[in-house]
Amino acid sequence: MAELTVEVFEEKLDSFAKIVKEGFDAVDERFNSVDERFNSVDERFNILTSVMGARFTEMDEKLERMDKRINGLYTLIDSFITLHQKLDIELTALRDKYNRLDARVARLEGMPA
């Protein structure tokens, strides 16, 4: 009867081992599917990183071009302001010269200025 019990025990142990192995196999499959999903997510992040890197590089280039254009505009505005300042000075000088000439002509003609 002891042998019968050992045989029954071995059968039960074998069936338990099969059930445990099947459970571990199922868990392994689930881990494999999770690994595949993580690999997929990693690939998407790598793609996103490369795309974002390219866009940031493009944005940096555009910002550099925009800075150059803004600097060019500042230069043009500065020269425009300088030109108008010179014209204002020249106009003031011409106005004073005109007033002096007008006063001189008025004196020469005997007219009150």
Image: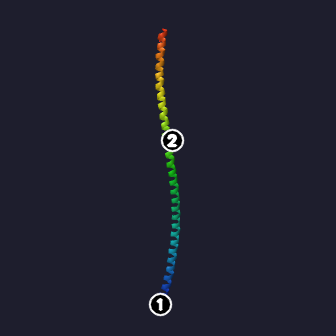
User: For the point 52% across and 74% down, which residue is it?
Assistant: 25
User: For the point 52% across and 69% down, which residue is it?
Assistant: 32
Asked if residue 16 is positioned above or below residue 4 in the image, the reply reads above
Q: Nearer the viewer, residue 71 or 42?
A: 71
Query: Element under label 2?
Result: helix
Residue 1 x, y percent position in the rendering: 47, 91
User: For the point 48% across and 10% down, which residue is it?
Assistant: 108
Q: Residues within 10 Å of mark 1 (few under 14, many from 20)?
A: few
Specify which label sits upstream in the sequence, 2 or 1. Answer: 1
Query: Can I make out residue 68 in this image?
Result: yes
Disc 2 residue type?
A: Arg
User: For the point 48% across and 15% down, which residue is it?
Assistant: 102
Query: Element under label 1?
Result: helix
Query: Can I make out residue 111 in this image?
Result: no
Q: Which mark is residue 69?
A: 2
Q: CA–CA distance between discs 2 and 1?
A: 96 Å
Q: Nearer the viewer, residue 18 or 69?
A: 69
Residue furthest toward the top?
110
Residue 28 x, y percent position in the rendering: 51, 72
Q: Which residue is label 1 attached to?
A: 3
